[in-house]
Image (cartoon, grey):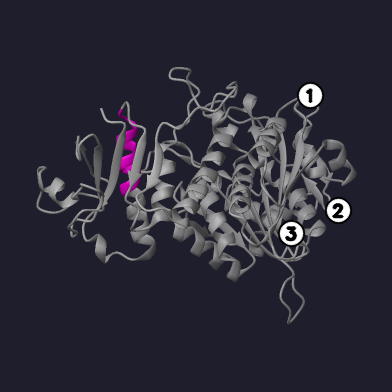
Amino acid sequence: MSSSAYIVPFDHQSTGELAPGVNPAQLWAATPQGEKPPPVGTVRTFYNTPPSKVTAVSSLGEKFANKKGDAKRELLRKSVGSAVKELKALDGLKDVAIDASIDPHAAAVAAHLALYKFTLKTTPPSPFNPNLKEPLPEKLNFSPLQASKEWDRGVVYAKAQNFARTLMELPANLMTPTIFTERVKEQFAGLKNVEIIVRDEAWAAEKNMNTFLSVTHGTSEPAKFMEIHYKGAPSKDAQPLAFVGKGITFDSGGISLKPGAGMKLMRGDMGGAATVVSAAWAIAQLQLPVNLVVTTPLTENMPGPSATKPGDIVYAMNGKSVEVDNTDAEGRLILSDAIYYTSTEYKPHTLVDVATLTGAVVVALGEVFSGVFSTSDALWEQLRVAGETEYDRFWRMPLEEDYGPQIHSSNADLQNTGGKDAGSCTAALFLKPFAAGIEAEEGQEPAMKWAHIDIAGSMEATRPTPYLEKGMTGRPVRALIEFVRNL
């Protein structure tokens, strides 16, 4: 078995060599043929072709040349990802050169996402083992046939998403709030223009973050509130963009205990925090010319003897009273204080919060789209375009005051659940009063644009795709990076 290989995405209408000594049309013609080209991602693997190499020719599907833009990029991702999955199953391969000429960024993303597979099995040794003294080498090393900045950028996008996948996949005993902050600081080490601040519960109490702290009472694990400050804009005083991520490192439901079946999935309930810090890492790695503030409230939600009880009323940082109708609706409780703190302390022009917030959005959108609720049509359009470019797609959901009676009818200003109907909509509406600056005076623009992204459905792939294995997805990391790059 050779130790090196080529991956050649193949347009069935093309001719000629695409890699040295590799004519994909001739190779494909030597295999059994149907009446029309096979589906995208169909791979033919040729050994000792050219001599001492393996070549994987991967179909781009029928009439690829007629495709445009986002659709064309996604077909390329599927083609490259399918070839990587084919080659990573072979023993002995190490170096893989990819014909990335169609779209180097998309090819790099697909290759590095398809290679990723999380496991903590000890045979063969796992690169995710937290006890490793030195990192293990990647199973395959990828390079483009022609180097480019676009390829390098795509590698950063994919590595950021894979970092989020790892944070979400690691079990809760290996990803406590404290460990989360340590892993993030380790990841950001050496990056320019970055400051990371980790706050404790005493600081949160001084800030009157009582909705956040109400979730921490049932666990013995210390809660944390982490801030990442990246100053890449020409002016360090320029108004920042802000990300806020929900960081429940394990969600048992608290006193309103979840059913036992499938509860281990709740190790990923910090997916909002994982994705915003991973996007921030890529933004800093690429040195994008923006100022960015990222905040992540981090805690477990457990049914301990001091846990918050259904019916308890707490006063949030903004002074509003909140009735905890269900302790399993804890995400909006920690987000509300975090959103209010971030929007008032740093006064960003735009704030995007990301959270694995509601089962209702899973019912509405499944795992294909992430739900977006926004006060700004312009912000929604920017997110939509970024999501389509990276095929990390968003669907706009209604943020309407008409849902208000479902969460206002209690003994407090707000109630943290509003019943089964429109559950993701009432959750978003609950957060709205904490986004300071979204209300505009007549004839003026709001001081802040706000979007809430519910990723409870898109957090996990229950079935593999050509360039993702089953498991935590790390979405919407790439869409967030692309959104910021486009600003």
Q: Mark 2 highlights which residue?
A: 319
Secondary element at image label 1: loop
The image quadrant that residue 299 belongs to is top right
Residue bounds of the magenta highlight:
79-90
Q: Amino acid at mark 2?
A: Gly
Figure quadrant of residue 94: top left
Q: Principal SS element in the magenta part?
A: helix
Q: Where in the figure is residue 284, as x and y percent of width and height?
A: 63, 51
Q: Which mark is residue 305?
A: 1
Q: Position of residue 337 (x, y in %)?
A: 78, 49
- Tag count in the figure? 3
Q: Hey, what amino acid is under mark 1?
A: Pro
- Name the residue beneath numbered marker 3: 435
Q: Which class describes the residues within 10 Å of circle 2: few (<14), some (14-19), or many (20+)?
A: few
**From the viewer's perspective, is the residue at label 3 or at label 2 nearer?**
3
Query: Which residue is located at x 19 percent, y 49 percent?
Result: 24
Mark 3 falls on what kind of element? Answer: loop
Q: Which corner quadrant holds the N terminus?
A: top left
